[in-house]
Image (spheres, grey):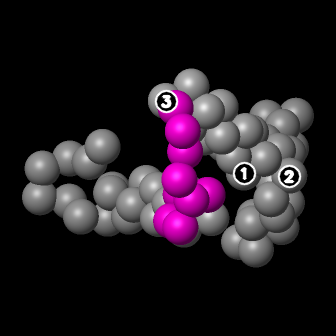
Amino acid sequence: MSRKGNCFDNSPIENFFGLLKQEMYYGVIYTSFKQLKQVIEDWIHCYNHHQIKTKLGCSPIRYREWITA
């Protein structure tokens, strides 16, 4: 995830996993791996397509579409 000796490479991914655990994992008991996998996939889709990031001013997918257009 990051280059050796460069902690700044790792901070975005640490933030992502922290949000994932906070929003859909803590306090919830999943009955199967299949259910957990589906919830994670749904959360990642929502994160990329629907959640507005303040720094970007839009969702990550919309931002990538905008900068490549």
Disc number placed over residue 47 in the picture, else none? 1
Classed neighbour count for the residue bearing mark 2: other residues with Cα under 10 Å, few (<14), some (14–19), many (≥20): some
Q: Which residues are magenta?
A: 24-32
Residue 18 falls left or right of residue 69: left
Q: CA distance from mark 2 to mark 1?
A: 6 Å
Residue 4 magenta-highlighted:
no
Mark closest to the chain's N terminus, 1 or 3? 3
Which residue occupies the extreme left position in the image? 5
Residue 29 falls left or right of residue 23: left
Judge depth for marks 2 and 3 and give the one in front: 3
Relative depth, front residue between 24 and 64: 24
Classed neighbour count for the residue bearing mark 1: other residues with Cα under 10 Å, few (<14), some (14–19), many (≥20): some
Relative depth, front residue between 53 and 45: 45
Classed neighbour count for the residue bearing mark 3: other residues with Cα under 10 Å, few (<14), some (14–19), many (≥20): few
Mark closest to the chain's N terminus, 2 or 3? 3
Disc number placed over residue 50 in the picture, else none? 2
Relative depth, front residue between 30 and 23: 30
- Image point (79%, 35%), residue name: 68
Find residue 54 and report its horizontal and vertical position in percent: 76, 74
Helix, strand or loop for disc 1 = helix
Judge depth for marks 1 and 3 and give the one in front: 3
Q: CA distance from mark 1 to mark 3?
A: 21 Å
Find residue 35 and report its horizontal and vertical position in percent: 61, 33
> What residue is disc 3 on?
33
Q: CA distance from mark 2 to mark 3?
A: 25 Å
**Image quadrant where one finds the N terminus:** top left
Disc number placed over residue 60 in the picture, else none? none
